[in-house]
Amino acid sequence: MKRYLITVKGISYEVEVEELKENSSRLSKEPVQTEPKEIKETKTEAPVPKAAPVSAGGSKNITCPMPGSILKVLVKPGDKVKKGDVLIILEAMKMENEIFASSDEIIASIDVKEGTTVNTGDVLITFK
């Protein structure tokens, strides 16, 4: 038996899996009934990627936290944003990730377009 920890929608389950060999007598097309064992359930928060501002020549940037593609740009140059506002929706590993403003700022430029493929560390937005 091998033990694994599997997380589904933020809830972790500890499971045991038995590997069957091809010539095993337990291999059949009929379902095997076993007694249910105690399930250990633990609540965990999925890690949220953070785009940290980076100082570059007096301006601040929001950089890409992971490779993906830009689904939506929700702001435009000149917009005033508050800490926690969603600026961009980034699709990575078939999941939509929100890129938030890390402080109250004014958008100087949007450095990506919708549909653009980005890599970790690419500048997404520059603040004044």
Image (tube, rainbow, N blue to C red):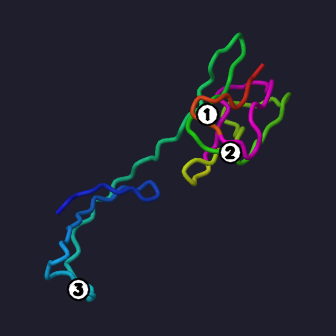
The residue furthest top is 57
Q: Which residue is mark 2?
A: 89
The label on residue 53 is none
Q: Secondary structure at mark 3?
A: loop
Lower sequence index among marks 3 and 1: 3
The label on residue 28 is 3
Lower sequence index among marks 3 and 2: 3
Label 2 to label 1: alpha-carbon separation: 11 Å
Q: Residue at x 46, y 47 (%)?
A: 46
In the image, residue 115 lies in the stretch drawn in magenta: yes
In the image, residue 66 lies in the stretch drawn in magenta: no
Lower sequence index among marks 2 and 1: 1
Q: Between tags 2 and 1, which lies in front? A: 1
In x, y percent, where is residue 80?
A: 81, 29
> Badge 3: few (under 14), some or many (20 or more) residues near its Cα, within 10 Å?
few
Amino acid, disc 1: Cys
Which residues lie in the magenta part?
Answer: 97-117
Q: Is residue 13 found left or right of 70 in the rendered image?
A: left
